[in-house]
Image (cartoon, grey):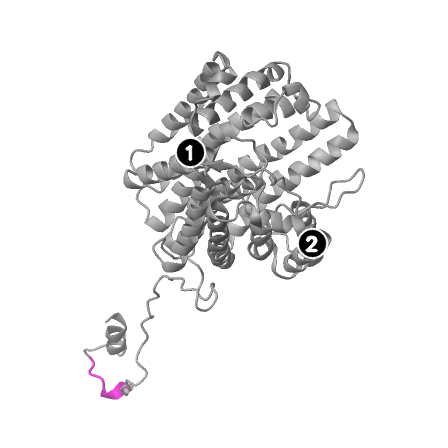
Amino acid sequence: MNYIVLVIIFLGAIYTTSRYGPARTFSLIVLPTMLYLATTMAYKIANIPAFDPVSCIAYGTLIGMALGRRVPKLTIHPIDYLIAVMTLTPAISGWLNVEFWTFINMGSDRIFWWLVPYMLGRMALSDPIERARALKVLCIATPIIGFLALLEWRLLPNEVSRFTNRISLTNVNNEMVLKRFAFFRSMVFYHHPIDHGNMGVMTGAMIVILAYMSGKSIWSRTVMIGLGGSLVCIFTSMSFTSYLAAAVAVGLVYFFFKLPSQRWVLPLFVLFMVGGMLYLTNDLLSKQLNDEQRINANALQDSLWIRALIVQRAWEFAQQAGFFGFEREVSKDQLALESVDNSYMLFIIRFGWIYLAGWVILLASFTVIAYRMFKTTVFAPTSVRLPVITATCALLGVMCGMYTVWFGFTYSYFFMIILGMFITLRQMTRTAFARSAYSPMPGSAARGFGVRQTPRVRPKTEPQSVPQAEPQAVPQTVPQTGRVDAIGQN
């Protein structure tokens, strides 16, 4: 079953890209695939990257662009170079620690999961027609996921992923049912409940961005249904990581939207976030842990205890990681952990301190760009300000949550898409700072979708029924064209 699905994704990406362009592929292929089929089992071939949904999208899009000669024209931004360098760093780590083929596989993996979604996000937001189409796809897909999540949350734990396993579509570890606060933690089509919750944050942010850039308000019925599905995904995951990311994102959006002149808070918050992570790491390293502390601990205390254990055991290897890390040469047995639920610690262990430095540079550059965008759009209408604020705050919220989960689930793919959208937003606010640049073109949305368009003023024309007076009948004191000019001015 999984082979059939992979072939359909691959051929669908080729056909859609070659005929309509990569922006249409994003709307009709990328979004449905990553929302519903991201965990499809890969087809593995020795010494080349495995064929999974992500690589099938990338291969199909590249082949379709070559066949249809539909290479989009994008203005290069300095962040594009940084993303390319951060794509190459993990590949170098694989080469130095293992062999040349690891360099090829790791480089391809980073291109598929890092560079391709970033560029797709940039291209999709540049097309006003596809913005409306992508919004419609999200507003249909997320309520379905939310409904299935409610079933898993209370009635049928892990039943969706177990069903896809039974039909040989996925191979997700769902034997152990996770429970919190007397409810089951839903995971539906994803690898883990945390991934499910973070996807709710990402899809909710994307819906808001696309809605206002397609001429719709978040209070419209379609958008409200889509946002409701995203909120259900966040809630039913029962994940403190997702709750933290959502709380930070929503809180910052509300603050900067209500107080647009207080943009100085943005760099202050980023400094507080980085400083808080450093302080928390130092505190967890000095904390004395024993199994007795977990006996009477509640769910939150138990989660914090696990994070402290992860930091303490991973720090020993992080100190020895060097510039390019160990790639995957450090096993679970050496760490004595099932997983390293800390993205930044895992970055150091796998790819080295250079890769973490790349993330720091990315965060600093992102903050400077966002600050300038806030300054540029301080007096702009809501349709311009809210997408900028939402993209900024959603990325910061997820970065906060990444301290307690690894970066590599399906949500990381959407993280890169929104980052690409953010850079395109930056270029649009600089080159086309007007309401018309964010509105769809006439007829851009599907019939019945309900996109509100900017009203058009009917041009004034000269009346055709006014007869022209004969030259000899017009008084000499009145110019011949005076009557017509007066009508045109009125």
Residue found at the far right of this picture: 46
- 1 vs 2, front mark: 1
Q: Which residues are magenta?
A: 471-476
Q: Which percent across, then down, holds residue 199?
A: 50, 43
Q: Is residue 58 left or right of residue 463?
A: right
Residue 456 drawn in magenta: no
The reply to whether dot 1 and dot 2 touch (C-beta < 8 Å) is no
Residue 200: % across, % down: 47, 44
Assign a secondary structure to mark 1.
helix
Q: CA distance from mark 1 to mark 2?
A: 36 Å
Residue 201 x/y as whole percent: 45, 42
Mark 2 belongs to which amino acid?
Phe
**486 on left or right of 390:** left
Q: Which corner quadrant of the image does residue 359 belong to?
A: top right
Left or right: residue 406 versus residue 441 is right
**Where does label 2 land, which residue?**
10
> Mark 2, residues whose alpha carbon is within 10 Å: few (<14), some, or many (≥20)?
many
Disc number placed over residue 244 in the picture, else none: 1
Q: Residue at x 53, y 19 (%)?
A: 309
Answer whether residue 427 is visible to the viewer in this image: no
Count of number-bearing discs: 2
Local secondary structure at mark 2: helix
Q: Position of residue 107 (x, y in %)?
A: 69, 35
Among the 4 quarters of the image, the one containing residue 318 = top right
Q: Name which residue lies at 42% across and 21% down.
A: 276
